[in-house]
Image (spheres, helix red, strand yellow):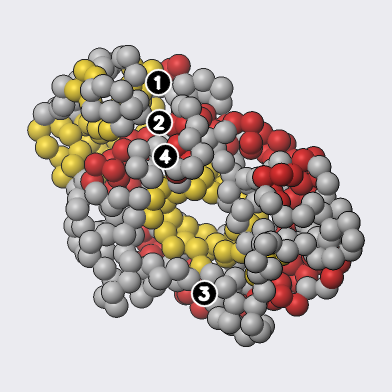
């Protein structure tokens, strides 16, 4: 009896140890949530669906990518996204696929009530008479759009539908919420005649789309806090995912910071907006673009870590690697997201980055447990100097770190991997970043 009892205890102890190891293995993250285009814009088009599903929780397709979306979800992909743009209607040569500058040629067949009109009752066009604006507030436009979404979701075997984790992107819906910015130099429409009416009309369309699909809004200008606050208030409860296009990675900040709409402290505004979105329980897709070089991508990744939420943050590095796909297409698969930080020691709030300030102009966030391709590597930290000023000394951190991340120069699909080099920098150049491990 004593021998049997001892044997039972040993078996039980072994079982507990196995369960503990299994739980640790399950808990160890393989990579941060990631996204990539997969069919529709000539990126990653010919890569295997199983490869995409195992490395990207999100992919996006055009309306002609229904087969790719279905294959991706069938291979285990979580979220297939259908691209649509309700913002503008191009005058198409015909309703045939590929005959129109705008892929959604169905909009060329909309009834007159779905369009905007001037005071004389004429349809509002741009100066070249090539573009029209839809009337989001009209039942005609909303019903036509929803009917088309139903058809497209069915054609994807439900991959773009909410029941299978799908989303529908509504491009250009987040920005240009003021009437004059929205219509530009076009004649003023009578149907939508104020700033409030612009936002209300967008909310009306979103409400219709949400009846058949999970809306994902793009065009939200995070650099300008006042620009998105009213829209968030109008669509809250119906939209739970947002594209943050030009997130941190066009030259050094966001596209608006370095492009035609420079905004003071755009990097800080981006971080606060992300904290706002994820703090509400919504998903933020941080869409970085620009130079595929390691230094630029590192700036993006470290900035992404500043407000990283394991459940609600998605990394989207749309930067073409030097090595293409087998058929010569742009390859945007990187292994940068294989380093996963967990258990942050500091976190920003929706209205303050004070907890992340480090030194004169740097921001830092440290993590108690980190992983590299599911392998524990102890503590890690990200430090960013978003300032355009002088080089600064490396700020003091709580932990001690002896290794620096070096990102690869080629793609994940091509087999390239990042490395860790001994040591840590003593300074940070303007608009640069570093990721450290113990």
| Residue 294 image point, x, y percent | 23, 46
- Quick one: label 3, few (<14), some, or many (20+) residues within 10 Å? many
For marks 1 and 2 on the same chain, the one whose residue lies earlier in the sequence: 2
106 left or right, relative to 58: right
Report the residue at 10% width, 33% height from top: 422
Q: Which residue is mark 2?
A: 306
Q: Are marks 3 and 1 in contact (CB under 8 Å)?
A: no
For marks 4 and 2 on the same chain, the one whose residue lies earlier in the sequence: 4
For marks 4 and 3 on the same chain, the one whose residue lies earlier in the sequence: 3
Q: Quadrant of residue 6?
A: top left
Q: Are marks 2 and 3 in contact (CB under 8 Å)?
A: no
CA gap between label 4 and label 1 equals 24 Å
Can residue 16 be seen by looking at this rendering?
no
Q: Quadrant of residue 379?
A: top left
Q: Quadrant of residue 43?
A: bottom left
For marks 4 and 1 on the same chain, the one whose residue lies earlier in the sequence: 4
| Residue 23 image point, x, y percent | 36, 43
For marks 2 and 3 on the same chain, the one whose residue lies earlier in the sequence: 3
Q: Which residue is mark 1?
A: 356
Q: Are marks 1 and 2 in contact (CB under 8 Å)?
A: yes
Report the residue at 52% width, 35% height from top: 223
Is the N terminus in the top left, top right, bottom left or bottom right quadrant? top left
CA gap between label 3 and label 1 equals 41 Å
| Residue 135 image point, x, y percent | 79, 59
Q: Which residue is mark 3?
A: 65
322 left or right, relative to 237: left
CA gap between label 2 and label 3 equals 34 Å
Placement of 63 over or under 6, stated as above or below: below
Q: Which mark is residue 258?
A: 4
- Quick one: label 2, few (<14), some, or many (20+) residues within 10 Å? many
Report the residue at 88% width, 56% height from top: 119
| Nearest to viewer (mark 4 / mark 3) | 4
């Amino acid at each position: 009896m004593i021998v049997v009892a001892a044997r039972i205890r040993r078996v039980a102890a072994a079982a507990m140890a196995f369960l503990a190891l299994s739980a640790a293995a399950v808990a160890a993250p393989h990579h941060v949530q990631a996204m990539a285009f997969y069919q529709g814009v000539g990126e990653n088009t010919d890569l295997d669906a199983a490869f995409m599903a195992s490395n990207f929780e999100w992919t996006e397709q055009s309306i002609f990518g229904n087969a790719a979306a279905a294959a991706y979800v069938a291979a285990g992909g979580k979220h297939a996204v259908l691209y649509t743009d309700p913002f503008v209607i191009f005058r198409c040569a015909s309703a045939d696929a590929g005959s129109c500058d705008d892929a959604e040629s169905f909009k060329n067949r909309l009834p007159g009530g779905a369009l905007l009109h001037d005071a004389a009752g004429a349809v509002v066009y741009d100066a070249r008479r090539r573009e029209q604006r839809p009337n989001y507030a009209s039942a005609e436009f909303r019903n036509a759009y929803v009917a088309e979404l139903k058809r497209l979701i069915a054609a994807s075997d439900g991959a773009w539908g909410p029941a299978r984790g799908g989303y529908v992107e509504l491009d250009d819906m987040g920005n240009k919420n003021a009437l004059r910015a929205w219509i530009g130099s076009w004649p003023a429409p009578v149907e939508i005649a104020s700033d409030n009416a612009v936002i209300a009309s967008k909310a009306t369309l979103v409400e219709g789309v949400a009846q058949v699909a999970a809306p994902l809004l793009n065009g939200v200008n995070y650099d300008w806090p006042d620009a998105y606050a009213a829209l968030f208030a109008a669509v809250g409860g119906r939209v739970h995912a947002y594209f943050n296009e030009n997130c941190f990675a066009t030259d050094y900040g966001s596209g608006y910071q370095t492009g035609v709409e420079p905004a003071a402290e755009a990097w800080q505004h981006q971080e606060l907006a992300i904290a706002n979105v994820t703090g509400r329980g919504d998903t933020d897709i941080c869409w970085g673009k620009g130079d595929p070089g390691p230094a630029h991508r590192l700036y993006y990744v470290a900035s992404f870590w500043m407000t990283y939420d394991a459940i609600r943050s998605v990394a989207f590095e749309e930067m073409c690697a030097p090595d293409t796909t087998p058929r010569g297409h742009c390859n945007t698969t990187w292994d940068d997201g294989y380093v996963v930080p967990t258990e942050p020691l500091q976190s920003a709030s929706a209205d303050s980055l004070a907890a992340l300030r480090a030194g004169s102009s740097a921001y830092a966030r440290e993590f108690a447990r980190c992983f590299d391709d599911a392998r524990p590597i102890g503590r890690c930290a990200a430090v960013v100097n978003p300032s355009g000023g002088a080089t600064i000394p490396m700020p003091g951190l709580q932990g001690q770190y002896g290794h620096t991340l070096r990102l690869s120069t080629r793609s994940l699909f091509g087999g390239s991997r990042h490395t860790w080099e001994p040591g840590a920098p003593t300074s940070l150049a303007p608009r640069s970043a570093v990721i450290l491990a113990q």
